[in-house]
Image (tube, rainbow, N blue to C red):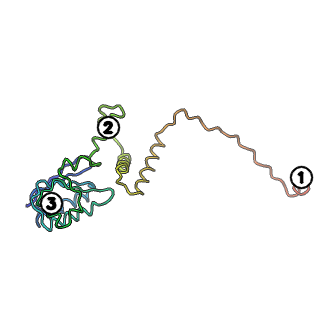
Amino acid sequence: MTVELQKERHSGVLVVSVEGRLDAEGSADFELFTQEAVSSGERHLILDFSKLGYISNAGLRALASLAKSLNTPSTSLRVAGVQPGVAQTLDAAGVAILIDARPSLEAALANHPAARGDDLSKHLGRLLGINDPGPIEVSPDQAKLAELAFELLAGKQHQHRAARAMAQGTQVLQRVAVPAASAPAPVRPKQAPAKKVGFWQRLFGKRS
């Protein structure tokens, strides 16, 4: 095997460390590995190229294909720590314009919205006055709503999915929110139905 692939999770981001050579053999392994990750539901990938020493045309095609598949509002691809020789090859092939390159893995993770799940939960706990909230059990529907809301705030949602997320959030709030000191609406007395007037009474002012 000419390439060694290792993965590590950082909240909503999957980091794939690529070590060795992305030649014809290594590129096939790399493409299979990343395709399986995307097919399994991964939407945010960071490729750590700090230990990648060579990339061939086959590797360039695999990388370009991955970049195109993750070029949507709800997905992302970043490449970190590209070495000078590999960077020169990417530039010459025109692949560099397809990727979001960062100088290091730390830089790629630093401002990634999907990698900040743990930090956001800690900030939320502090805002709520909870020092250690501990594990929180949520239903699948609540987890999906939280995911949609997070992507909406991060600007990663399509317009129709954003509207759906807001509609779901409104429904949840309507179920759990209790208005403070809300007075019941006054009940209006029912009005008696109007008495039907016959034809002769309307004509002569008398009962028929």
70 left or right, relative to 188: left
In which quadrant is the N terminus drawn?
A: bottom left
Separation of disc 3 and disc 1 at Cα?
101 Å
The secondary element bearing badge 1 is classed as loop
Whole-percent x and y of residue 51? 10, 54
Query: In what element is the residue under mark 3?
Result: helix
Q: Nearer the viewer, mark 2 or mark 1?
A: 2
Determine whether 189 is above or below 30 in the image: above
Between label 3 and label 2, give the one nearer the viewer.
3
Q: Residue beneath label 3, please?
A: 87
In the displayed structure, 40 sits above or below 113; it is below
At x 73%, y 44%, the residue is 191
Mark 3 to mark 2 CA distance (whole Å):
37 Å
Residue topped by disc 1? 207
> Residue at image x 27%, y 41%?
118
Please say whether residue 68 is visible from this viewpoint.
yes
Which amino acid type corresponds to the residue marked 3 in the rendered image? Ala
User: In the rendering, at what x and y percent does residue 74 appear?
Assistant: 32, 56
Mark positioned earlier in the residue sequence (3 or 2): 3
Query: Tag 1 or tag 2, which sits nearer the N-term?
Result: 2
Circle number at residue 106: none
Name the side, left or right, on which 141 lies relative to 33.
Answer: right
Which residue occupies the foreground of this view, 100 or 158? 100
- In the picture, residue 157 is in which quadrant? bottom left
Mark 3 neighbour class, 10 Å CA radius: few under 14, some 14 to 19, many 20 or more: some
Identify which amino acid the numbered label 1 is placed on. Answer: Arg
Q: Which residue is mark 2?
A: 123
Residue 125: image quadrant is: top left
